[in-house]
């Protein structure tokens, strides 16, 4: 989670929503790391976790990341949670809860739906939640002050 938090800081410094993600292999080694690039790429799908999963799949040479773990600073949104099912990740670990936009423990709770294609074997939420939530609050507070 420390690396994901550092990536989130980097995102905030360049004006992106501070979200960082890391994909680990079955032995806990880093396969890929990414931060949000939505604004820079002009791409609404350039979320940290989606970019990290794509990089990991490319590195592994497969679309199945069955023994892998996604570590992300914010509860995945519906798009990213759906990608977790398609990439077949074994585990999801996230920091801050997202009651408005999350899709794991909030909103559609994608993995709990009967129509879900694949459910991670383990979901660990709230890891370093205070730090991750503070990053987001600080970022959005700064945006509001700039608009005023």
Image (cartoon, grey):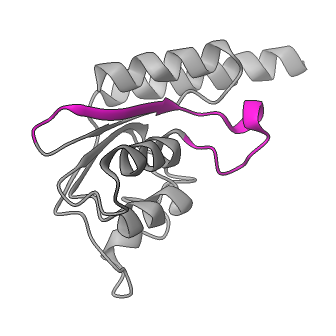
Residue found 24% across the figure and 63% down from its top: 120
Read off the magenta span.
Answer: 27-47
Does the magenta segment cover residue 73? no
Q: Relative to the observer, which residue lies in front, 16 or 26?
A: 26
- In this view, which residue lies farthest toward the right? 148
| Image spot of residue 103 (x, y percent) | 46, 61
User: Is residue 2 visible from the viewing direction of this image?
Assistant: yes
Count the marks: 0
Does the magenta segment cover residue 29? yes
| Image spot of residue 101 (x, y percent) | 56, 53
| Image spot of residue 30 (x, y percent) | 26, 31
Is 129 rendered above or below residue 89?
A: above
Residue found 50% across the figure and 23% down from its top: 8
Residue found 48% across the figure and 70% down from its top: 108
Quarter of image, res 104: bottom left
Left or right? Give the position of 16 relative to 19. Answer: right
Left or right? Give the position of 19 relative to 69. Answer: right
Residue found 44% across the figure and 41% down from its top: 52
Position of the N terminus, as image quadrant, is top left
Is 129 rendered above or below residue 114?
A: above
Quarter of image, res 126: top left
Left or right? Give the position of 147 relative to 118. Answer: right
Quarter of image, res 133: top left
Is 28 rendered above or below residue 132?
A: below
């Amino acid at each position: 989670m420390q690396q994901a938090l550092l990536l989130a800081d980097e995102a905030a410094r360049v004006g992106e929503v501070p979200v960082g993600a890391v994909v680990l292999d079955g032995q806990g080694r880093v396969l890929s790391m990414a931060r949000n690039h939505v604004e820079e790429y002009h791409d609404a799908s350039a979320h940290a976790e989606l970019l990290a999963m794509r990089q990991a799949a490319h590195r592994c040479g497969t679309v199945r990341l069955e023994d892998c773990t996604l570590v992300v600073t914010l509860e995945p949104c519906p798009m990213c949670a759906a990608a977790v099912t398609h990439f077949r990740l074994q585990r999801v670990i996230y920091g801050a809860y997202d009651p408005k936009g999350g899709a794991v423990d909030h909103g559609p709770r994608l993995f709990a739906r009967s129509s879900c294609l694949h459910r991670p074997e383990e979901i660990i939420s709230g890891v370093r939640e205070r730090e991750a939530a503070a990053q987001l609050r600080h970022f959005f507070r700064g945006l509001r002050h700039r608009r005023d």
